[in-house]
Image (cartoon, rainbow, N blue to C red):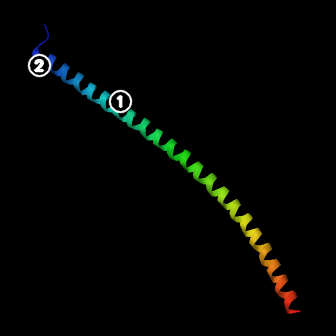
């Protein structure tokens, strides 16, 4: 018949293993949460880069229009000076 000490030691070891398994489960849950957050950040980042690209294209178009207007104004000013 097993002694009380052996049963206590075995129960203690089972408790330690259960603690480790619980910690591992908690770490896995935290890792999944972090992965979810990282995916959300990546999606937001992609959206921001798309927005920035669109804004740059719009800015280039506006700059082209302003350059053309500036050239036209310069030509009108020169024709008045002649």
Residue 1, picture quadrant: top left
- Judging from the image, what secondary structure is the residue with disc 1 in? helix
Left or right: residue 16 versus residue 25 is left
Residue 38: % across, % down? 49, 44
- Asked if 79 appears above or below 52 in the picture, the reply is below
- Rate crowding at label 2 as few (under 14), some (14 to 19) or many (20 or more) other CA atoms within 10 Å: few
Rounded to the nearest angstrom, the CA distance separating label 2 from label 1 is: 30 Å
Residue 17: % across, % down? 27, 25
The residue that disc 2 covers is: 5
The residue that disc 1 covers is: 25
Residue 49: % across, % down? 61, 53
Residue 51, picture quadrant: bottom right
Residue 27: % across, % down? 36, 35
Query: Which comes sooner in the sequence, label 2 or label 1?
Result: 2
- Asked if 46 appears above or below 25 in the picture, the reply is below
Given the current orientation, which residue lies at the most extreme front position?
80
Q: Quadrant of the C terminus?
A: bottom right
Q: In the image, what residue occupies the spot 19% across and 20% down? A: 11
Given the current orientation, which residue lies at the most extreme top position?
1
Q: Of the numbered discs in the image, which one, if any, rests on residue 71?
A: none
């Amino acid at each position: 018949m097993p002694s009380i000490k052996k049963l206590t030691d075995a129960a203690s070891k089972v408790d330690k293993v259960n603690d480790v398994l619980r910690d591992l489960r908690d770490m896995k849950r935290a890792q999944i949460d972090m992965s979810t957050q990282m995916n959300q950040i990546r999606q937001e980042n992609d959206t921001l880069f798309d927005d920035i690209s669109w804004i740059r294209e719009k800015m280039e178009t506006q700059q082209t229009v302003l350059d053309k207007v500036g050239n036209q104004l310069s030509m009108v000013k020169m024709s008045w000076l002649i």
